[in-house]
Image: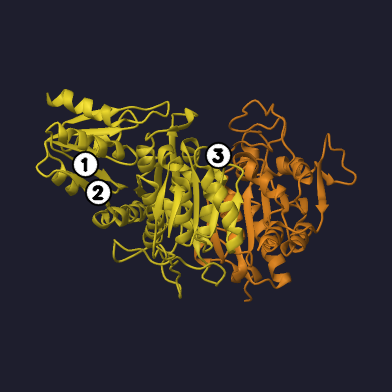
Amino acid sequence: MRRLMTGNEAVAEGALLAGCNFYSGYPITPSSEIMHIMAAELPKRGGNFIQAEDELAAINIAVGASIAGAIAMTATSGPGFSLMQEGIGYAIMTEVPVVIVNVMRVGPSTGQATKPAQGDLMQARWGRHGDQALVVYAPSSPQEALYITHKAFETAELLRTPVVVLTDEFIAHGREVVEYYDLKPVRRRIQEKPEPPFGSEDPTRVPPLPPLGEGFNVMFTGSTHDEWGYRDVHRQEVHFKLVKRIWDKIWMNSKSLFLYEKQGDDDAEVTFVCYGSVSRSVKGAIAVLRSKGIRAKLLRLITLWPIDWEVLEREIEGRVFVPEMSLGQLSFDVEKFAKVEKINKVGGGIPIYPSDIVKAVVEVMR
Amino acid sequence: MRKHFARKYLREEVLPSTFCPGCFNGIVINAFLKAVEELNADMRKVVFVSGIGCSSWIPSPHIKADSIHTLHGRAIAVATGVKIARPDLNVVVISGDGDLASIGGNHLIHAARRNMDLLVIMVNNLVYGMTRGQASPTTPLGLRTATTPYGNFELPMDICRILEQTNANYVARWCISNFFKLKDSIKEAFFMRGFRFIEVYAPCITYVVRYEGKTPGEKIRELFSVCMPKETADERKAIPIGVFKREDKPGYVEMYSEYRRSIS
């Protein structure tokens, strides 16, 4: 299949190809087109669509539907993403698969509602209270948005976890040719006989979800619970075992979860580390720098959490630049390995142009 | 010795419960399970959803059935997702006045607007019991609580009167002292379609008393005495008890499947 698509359309298509059959959401720019497509498509395909009364409801309805067996998602943007954090924390604690797409816009607060930004990286990783981990992906084009959204559903089912897909307004409303083949719907793993739904001998794997309505007497709770779901709000060892396992199932799989793109010259004098739409300006800048005799490479993170730190350590060479449409969040990661030159621009819907990047590099390298 | 009828519905391993001595939540459990017993309902097809607070512990962990214990205020939202994804299941929300009427008030009103096919039992204990007795949206005028130490000066809300104005199919309120009315009401609403709401007026035995300088017996009797049949109650002074609304409109699930049929 080959179609001209915006990033939002590609997200919706990727979700539908993954077998998403439940959408609950609340309107918010610049993510609303995802909701519009799901509102039109899901009822036709026997799925369910509900426009929630607010984002608190949107995420919690999706989680309830997922517990009941649906392949569920929601999409939102900054302010709505903030409202969803508690519900995402609940999905982490109860180990319920759900995909949350956040089309990043300029914040904080209402900010500039229609303008792109990359300010929600830390919120996606750390927005919940308590010790927790989930998976965050960030595509850089409509093409990749389709595949990564599909991938997000696979990962959510595999690890029984919420997965966040971070796009931004450039990707969401940018229109490009998207090609896709052979994407299969994900499969929900359901227990056939009662077994502990919240425990696993293998820390990298998660047991299937229990079915509702089959007499399994399932207990879901966001409170600390043992492997059968019995609440235990007192014992240290029960809590530690639970949160450590939820942490480990993400981080012990960091090598396989960590997707990245590498491009440019070996033996580079300059390494760019970035993610999302900004990487496209970086690619333009690398070509210009090469013409100026500066060898540069790009390390683009597709998975923003968890991170395979060894890749960063291995790939970073020369002077390191981290361009971001924020005042700098990804740069904290890179600073673990090198002195970082930050290139930051946010607001007004103005991208970081290749010329901005070239200028910053030339100034430092001179 | 014959076992109490309710024990087959309970997770005996979690008994005795953690409710305070004298707590009315036990009577709510009894009324619910008696209704189930008399209906001969299949508990495998019931999913309980509750929020945060004492009454949210009625189903989770006490009742032996599928149960989802959610975030504070979000029981109805989660229940909505469960019901839409699995319309064959009877989804029952049991939660408190703080959880459903305060922090979850928006979901309550919108579920009623949608006539969402849920049975919602709101145990109104007049305060936040689990967090040690702060005022709630249903705290009567003048009551001393942890956050109204000189007497509540805010006016309470009557959830039944609000929901009466929505598209809900069934709205009723009972005083916990009238066990059989409550049990019969649960029986009546159990298999109805659409949004069914039953408020159980059951003052917190511990915290509506604590700051009042009265004995539990005195204070509870005083609070019970304001409950009057709605047909005759003077609502300026009394809490009207009875069925406020009883209709049989198609609920959300039927309307959505009709919508889906109409476009395919």
Badge 2: residue crowd in 10 Å (few <14, some 14–19, many ≥20): few
Circle 1 sits on which residue? Answer: A298
Numbered disc in front, either 3 or 2 = 2
| Drawing shade for chain B | orange
Residues at marks 1 and 3, CA–CA distance in whole angstroms: 56 Å
Chain holding disc 2: A
- Labels 1 and 3 touching (C-beta < 8 A): no
Report the coloring of the rendering.
by chain
Q: Mark 3 lies on which chain?
A: B
| Element class at badge 2 | strand
Q: Residue B132 carries which label?
A: 3
The answer to whether the residues at label 1 and label 2 have Cβ atoms under 8 Å apart is yes
Q: Which amino acid does label 1 sit on?
A: Leu
Closest to the observer, B168 or B150: B168
The amino acid on which the numbered mark 3 sits, given as a three-letter code, is Arg
B3 vs A216, left or right, is right
Chain A pictured colour: yellow
Residue carrying label 2: A261
Say left or right for B201 vs A17: right
Q: What residue type is labelled 2?
A: Glu
Chain containing the residue with disc 1: A
